[in-house]
Image (tube, grey):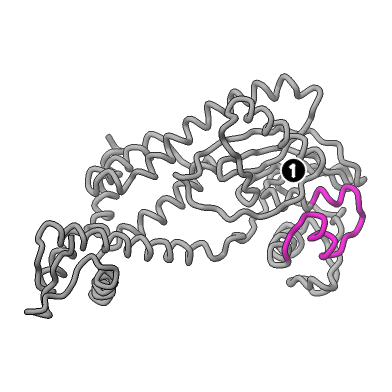
Amino acid sequence: EALELKLDELLQLFLLIADKDLFAEIYRERLAKRLLNRRFISLHAEKIMIIKMKTQQGAPFTTKLEGMVNDFGIGEDLAKLWQAHYAQIGSGKNDGENNRKNSILTSSQTSMHNDLHLKPSLEFSVQVLTQGFWPAQKFRELHLTRELTNAKNEFDQWYKARHSHRLLTWIYALGEATVRATFHHSKKYDISLSTFQAVTLLLFNSASSLSFQSICDSLGLDVATGKRILHSLACGKHKILIKTGQPKSINHSQDEFRINCEFSSKLKRFSIPIPSLDAESRKDINLEVQQQRGYNIDATLVRIMKARKRLTHQELIGEVIHQIQNFTPEIKLLRQRIEALIERGYIQRDDADPRSYIYLP
């Protein structure tokens, strides 16, 4: 009952939002993060809130949100089947990594020692998701270690045997990993990292010092991505790496990196945040919303004119504003869309009254 009351209060705030289409895209992005990072309080609460928005705005408004929640549940069931399979082969193949896909999220655990020898103890979990429901993600190349590649290939083969008609795309930027690191004096820490950060640290199990360029070449990273990753590991609160040059900035042409063997922290478990690798995501959302608004306005204009056959400019503008509920269309945009429909031959101006439009069947 308390949950229902709180969600009803949130719904009242939702009803006051003018640009509900923009809100829906941002909500979908945040919902994806909550689900994939297991940071939701209750899946039941997520479903109830989506139902409440669906009741107010109609089914099309929440189609993708419902698809995400349902898809997440189905992916959980598949993940359990994979875990059972992986447990059977675990004694022979100790692979893993925390990756993700347009369709897949995986998590893992690895070990890193200051003697620079990798002794992996990997847990590898995977969640398969349907690409159409979830926010689009940019594919970023990443060269995995041998152990992680073996684990990924094992899953690919297992999944293909079950669903031969489906194509998996790994989106490493959304992956997470827990790395167990042992420094001098046998100090051990469990560090929560992104997949990119984890694979970067694993390079130092076979090299005492690496240049910025050699790290990027080994992992297949561009300069901008490499800077974000290495800045988080060498210039943040938890300095796992030591670098040459300026302590607070990355010089991609000169800096060298090595493990900070004297690293110490009061926390045995901690995370190292990293700035989003997709800094343009909010701009992409705004661009997508603007495109969808154009399609929505076009469809509404054609639907109205097909039903009414002839309308004055003011009557048409008023009908469109009345029928579109997810956002308040700008008059300038409406005029642009009307002109575009005239050019495309959907409507034309009335020769007898230029302020009126006629539908062209």
Foreground of the two, 198 or 68:
68
Question: Which secondary structure lies at badge 1?
Answer: strand
Mark 1 belongs to which amino acid?
Val
**Residue visible at 19% across and 57% down?**
303
Residue 45 image point, x, y percent: 36, 38
- 305 horizontally vs 86: left or right: left
- 281 horizontally vs 216: left or right: left
**Residue visible at 77% across and 35% down?**
150
Magenta residue check for 218: yes
Foreground of the two, 61 or 159:
159
Residue 106 image point, x, y percent: 64, 38
**Residue visible at 48% across and 67% down?**
283
Q: Quadrant of residue 109?
A: top right
Residue 128 shows in the view: yes
* Residue for badge 1: 179
Instruction: Categorize mark 1 by other alpha carbons within 10 Å: few (<14), some (14-19), many (20+).
Output: many
Foreground of the two, 167 or 82:
167
Rendered position, 330 above or below 263: below
Magenta residue check for 300: no
- Which residue range is magenta in the image? 201-222
How many discs mark residues in the rendered view? 1
- 264 horizontally vs 137: left or right: right
Q: Residue furthest left?
A: 352
